[in-house]
Amino acid sequence: MGGRVVVVGSVNTDLVARTRVLPRPGETVSGASFMVAGGGKGANAAVAAARQGAAVALVACLGDDDFGAARLADLAREGIDLAGVRRSSVASSGVALIVVDERGQNSIVVVPGTNGLVTPPMAEEVTLAPGDVMLTQLEVPLPTVEAALRRAHAARAVAVLNVAPYQPAVAGLLPLVDVLIVNELEAADLLGAPPLTPERAPDAAAALRTRGAGAVAITLGGDGAVIAAADWHDRLPAPAVTVVDTTGAGDAFTGTLAAGLAAGLHLRDAAVRAIASGSLAVTRAGAQPSLPTRAEVDALLAAGGDH
């Protein structure tokens, strides 16, 4: 049966406008379309894991508002355990304002709202067992992230941290992390280095392991990912796809990797599936609407999407 994926993280409502070019400061541009969809790195990763067949529980906080009610309904339809989701009237539900250009690149403003009310005790109260995966990111307060990682270690579960959005203080948490997920910019920031090239990513992954992380996955967009563990490392390519919208691609990778680990896959095999998932996600608009199913990932891999 495998273990569960428990996500401690954010839930947002994404307000997405598509336009030809991203506006410059002070500039107004005409949009081609508008969409409202579920988002937030925590919720996105939870949905990604659920669509891969994992049993998923979410620890989060939403406002007593229409956005909060809509997101709860969305997540319930995905079969996610929402017992750890609280509602609050202290703040509004989190919102992300996203502009996507015709190349699929995006510009995002996040208003955290109730995501800032996800507390350490909420993470500490989570039921975990050996074989479960605790997954967290940095859109909730850092003390809560630390509490989630410590809870995972106490339960002998797998602690997975996606360092997004980057915060310098997260460097002190690396010894608590079993699997660290970063993109090339986040890896460079953690190391205090210039932006990474794909050729330098293996050295960066090894360097991050010396900072305390048990294993490291550096995502490289269309160049795939580099994975480094205690006794092996590998560079895994990504299939060639047509990019529509990069929003949510990193969360597709993260949630799919967590689902693979919870199912007992080797880290390399879980990463192959995660890369395929992220590649499929960029071919569609939106964050949660773009997240693929297990069958879609299987089909891409069967068609040769792992090389």
Image (cartoon, grey):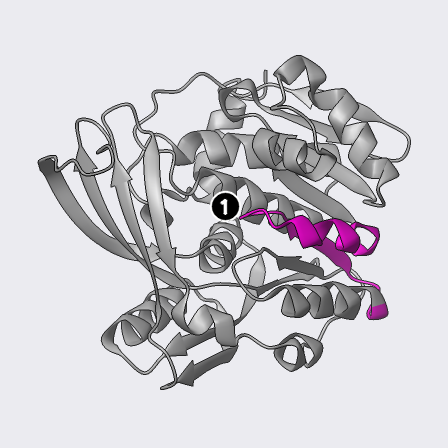
Q: Under tag 1, what secondary structure?
A: helix
Is residue 241 inside the magenta stretch?
no
Q: Is residue 18 left or right of residue 199?
A: left
Q: Residue furthest bottom?
A: 89
Q: Nearer the viewer, residue 196 or 255?
A: 196
Q: Is residue 169 magenta?
A: yes
Residue at 24% x, 31% y is 22
Q: Nearer the viewer, residue 271 or 176?
A: 176
x 39%, y 85%: residue = 90
Q: Which residue is mark 1?
A: 251
Residue 140: where, in percent of width, then height? 54, 64
**Which corner quadrant holds the N terminus?**
bottom right
In the image, 220: left or right of 1?
A: left
- Mark 1 packing: few (<14 Cα in 10 Å), some, or many (20+)? many
Above or below, comparing residue 179 to residue 205 in the picture? below
Q: Quadrant of residue 198?
A: top right
Residue at the (70%, 48%) spot, across then down: 261
Q: Amino acid at mark 1?
A: Asp
The picture places residue 42, in percent across and down from the top left corner, at 50, 59
The reply, left or right, for residue 194 in relation to residue 59 is: right
Figure check: 19 above or below 62: above
Give coordinates of residue 211: x percent, y percent. 84, 41
Which quadrant of the structure image shows residue 191? top right
Residue 126 in view (yes/no): yes
The residue at 75%/22% (across/down) is 202
Asked if 182 appears above or below 16 in the picture, the reply is above
Instruction: Say which quadrant the C terminus sits in.
Output: top right
138 w.r.t. 18: above or below:
below
Q: Which stretch appears magenta?
A: 154-177
Outermost residue, right direction? 231
